[in-house]
Image: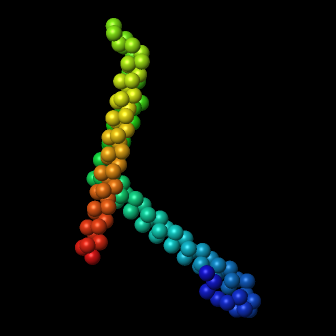
Amino acid sequence: MLDHPLNENKFKSLTAQIKDAEMQLQEHQRMVSACKDALIQKTQQKITTPSSLLLAGGIGFILSELTKNKPLKFHPGITEESHTAETSDISKHLMSTLNLLNSINALYTTFRASMKETKT
């Protein structure tokens, strides 16, 4: 971190040491800004990939179906237990669909990464 050995700092004036510290601070701020910009760019690229958008859409659909407030309509011959079982079955199917979408996304991401490695 220090550009100068400690012995040299003893012989520098306080003003020179402050200027050195300010220059180091400015350099660190530039480095943080550059890393931040690179991170934002990579995040935007990852978020807008087709697989991420498909996964986000699938998750949104599944969550909306799971949290949808359905009015309970009791028909003759349909008990509350059978209605609960029906809702539970739908939830199981939606959760398995979500797991499938997640697996597809993982496979797609792995495939793309392996294709990039073979090109280089």
Q: In the rendered view of the protein, which quadrant contains the C terminus?
A: bottom left
Nearest the camera: 81 or 61? 81
Q: Does residue 11 lie above or below 57 as drawn?
A: below
Q: Is residue 60 visible?
A: no
The quarter of the displayed image where residue 78 is located? top left
The x, y position of residue 64, in whole percent, is 37, 33
Q: Does residue 41 lie above or below 102 as drawn?
A: below
Q: How many marks?
A: 0
Q: How is the image coloured?
A: rainbow
Residue at horizontal 42 percent and vertical 18 percent from the top: 81
Nearest the camera: 29 or 91? 91
The x, y position of residue 84, in whole percent, is 41, 22
Q: Is residue 106 visible?
A: yes
Nearest the camera: 102 or 48? 102
Tell me: 8 left or right of 82.
right
Residue at horizontal 62 percent and vertical 77 percent from the top: 22
The x, y position of residue 86, in whole percent, is 36, 24
The x, y position of residue 6, in whole percent, is 71, 88
Residue at horizontal 68 percent and vertical 85 percent from the top: 16
The quarter of the displayed image where residue 111 is located? bottom left
Identity of the residue furthest to the right in this view: 10
Residue at horizontal 60 percent and vertical 74 percent from the top: 25
Identity of the residue furthest to the top in this view: 76
Q: In the rendered view of the protein, which quadrant contains the N terminus?
A: bottom right
